Image: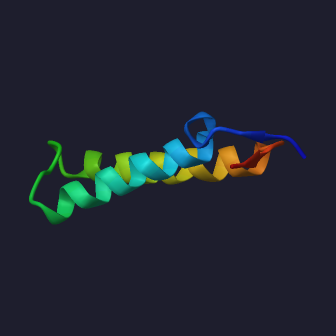
Amino acid sequence: MDTKAWWKSVSVWGNIIAIIATAGGFFGYVVTPENQAAGAALLGECVGLWGRLRASTRLN
């Protein structure tokens, strides 16, 4: 299996989005309306899962 740089991974970026959305809530930052913060986290998790499912190369 081939390898690629970590920053080229859709699953890594999806998880970064989810982490930022979650961390923002812990620090009191809420996107108006509040449901948008939850939506951003959900979107990030979905992108992460989608990227891992379609991955064809290993990360190094």
Q: Is residue 47 left or right of residue 41?
A: right
Q: Check the image and name the residue furthest to the bottom.
A: 26
Q: Is residue 43 left or right of residue 26?
A: right
Q: Residue at coordinates 61% horizontally, 39% vertically from top-left?
A: 10
Q: Is residue 44 left or right of residue 47?
A: left
Q: Check the image and name the residue furthest to the front.
A: 60
The image position of residue 3, as x and y in percent, is 78, 42
Q: Check the image and name the residue furthest to the right.
A: 1
Q: How many marks?
A: 0
Image quarter of residue 33 = top left
The image position of residue 53, as x and y in percent, is 76, 50
What colour-coding does the image apply? rainbow
Q: Residue at coordinates 37% horizontally, 48% vertically from top-left?
A: 39
Depth check: give the residue in front, 41 or 9.
9
The image position of residue 38, as x and y in percent, is 32, 54
The image position of residue 17, as x and y in percent, is 40, 46
Vertically, is 41 above or below 8?
below
Q: Is residue 38 left or right of residue 14?
A: left
Q: Check the image and name the residue furthest to the top.
A: 8
Q: Residue at coordinates 90% horizontally, 46% vertically from top-left?
A: 1
